[in-house]
Amino acid sequence: MPSYEELKARVLSLPYEPGVYIMKNAAGQVIYVGKAKALKNRVTSYFQSPAGMTPKTRRMVSQINDFDIIVTESEFEALVLENSMIKKYKPKYNILLKDDKGYPYIRVTTSQPYPEFTIVAKPVADADRYFGPYSSRRAARQAIDTISEALKLKTCRRRFPRDIGRERPCLYLHMGRCVAPCTGKVSPEEYADLVAQATALLEGNFKGLAREVEAAMLEASEALQFERAAMLRDRLRAVQTLGERQKVVAGSFADLDVLAFVQGQTRGCVVALHYLGGSLQDKDYTVIDGVTQADAGEVLGDFLKQYYALRQAVPRTVLLSADIEDSDAVAEFLASIAARKVELAVPQRGKRHDLVRLAEKNAAEEIARIETGQERRLKSLELLQGMIGLDTPPVLLEAYDISNFAGEGTVGSMIVFENAQPKKSRYRKFKIEVAAQGQDDYASMREMLTRRVQRYVDGDEKFAPLPDAFLIDGGLGHVRIAKEVLNSFGLTTPCFGMVKDDHHRTRGLVAPDGREFGISTVPAVFALIGRMQEEVHRFAITYNRKLTGKTVRGSTLDKIEGVGDKRRAELLKHFKSIENIRQASPEQLRLVVPAQVADAVYAFFHKEE
């Protein structure tokens, strides 16, 4: 097998030509197939810094042990080849739509004297007629049932003319729901006429049949045959509804599809809404694992190609919730299936934008329906495991934070999450002793972690077992302190800092060696780490306020002449902290308390001056 450096050297010799690249793992298995306008540019991107890669791409790149390329004449040819190879190899890191997911067809056995309607997986080259594909077997069955009821076609398993006259007619004849070819009173020609009307419905050509049913309904009404008129009214509605749906299924008659990808906490979902004449006719959805919202463009691009290749039915316009790569080539690929031009668009405003938002809402609803609380929690740990490179999911996590009040009353907090849920019976509080020598967060963190690990080493059951990972509220400096403490005890437990952005929102995790793992694109991990960071901070603040409330009441402000309970409260309410009071000018203090008291407060904090 070539070394990593040999692979990088091979990349530099690749041509600036369109083509397909095939990534393989150490076992020689194909793990990813992709296409490129310029092979050298695209493949080179996998051998650069992983900082800008999505988690899915990082996982794939970590397993690349070899690669092959196939140069093509055009980008379109590369896209077709890519789609074919994905179907052949089913690579682990490609978005895969399974053939057996179910886009069934309706088969009409027109080769028989009395044709039957059945559901099949795909068309074959024979003398029968096929209609579809349908979004599910349920949708196909509904179409058959509606047609059979509207046209009184047989639904039993008898075969004609073989079974004519062998048994008595079933109850459907007496209910008026079947023309009963079993009686021998319906000729193959008469039954074929009914089947012809049914196939017209399946093709979307329902208007003629609707006119006939409507005329018969009016005739029955005028003859005061109200029961028959009501039956024909229901048939007309069924014909009209099915006819509109069939235009969408027929593909060439469909106006518009809207595709949207939404990422939940544990999995993603692509929804396809099918429109005709501005009216929503049908919905299809596919659940996808192992991706994040950052993969939206790749997911939609791969979904588009495979979805319509399986359906073999493409509308005139497809609206998308995110941009996809090489949209011109994808549009050309879809046009080759539809035998006409296909428009791809990502609307930013207006009615089309509203349709995309509706598709996203439907995708979010599907995710909410299939995700359970336990599934989200377990999946978040699996995703965290893969992100930070642990051997097993981190079932037990501990987080730490330091809190102080204007340099006074420094405390530390330790919280524990087990299976991604708070384990409050194992929370611990630390009154930091080193803080008496001055405010030093690093020294405070060192003291807290040293005391915690020492209690474990000494056999204190309240501090056992150690977690699968330590999470420290703070940046690189804080997590390096944690690493030093663990090393001093000969422990190898992983530790990571929980870092925030400029807006005080959780940004990611940082390892002691400086590697940072962005988590904002992985909702499950983002929610878990954010929740732990907020919880450890809340626990520290609560303990800090409890201590500093006692300290302030018994010292500091109470030592100043003229400051009692009321004025102490007024000062703290206005300035928020003792440190702010310390830094206030006499003029600022006089806005809150009388001048004499303000001067006393200022003098107290500036004795040395």
Image: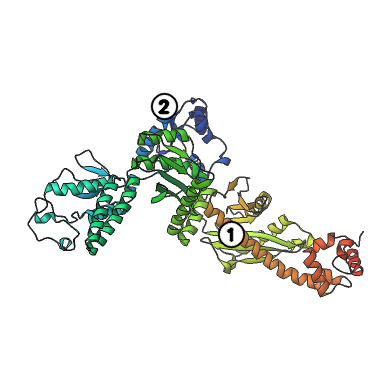
Q: Which residue is mark 1?
A: 531
Q: What is the secondary structure assignment of the residue under circle 2?
A: loop
Q: Position of residue 390 (x, y in %)?
A: 52, 50
Asked if 6 appears above or below 271 in the picture, the reply is above
State the colouring used for the structure image: rainbow
Seen in the image, is 157 located left or right of residue 42? left
Q: Three-letter amino acid code at disc 2? A: Thr
Distance between mark 1 and mark 2 Cα atoms: 50 Å
Q: Position of residue 407 (x, y in %)?
A: 77, 61
Q: Position of residue 555 (x, y in %)?
A: 82, 71
Of marks 1 and 2, the one in the foreground:
2
Seen in the image, is 559 located left or right of residue 515? right
Chain-order first, disc 1 or disc 2:
2
Quarter of the image that includes the N terminus: top left
Looking at this view, name the residue that lies furthest to the front.
222
Seen in the image, is 260 located left or right of residue 198? right
Q: Which residue is mark 2?
A: 72
Instruction: Name the residue located 35 percent from the left edge and 42 percent from the top edge.
Output: 253
Instruction: Name the residue located 15 percent from the left edge and 49 percent from the top edge.
Output: 191
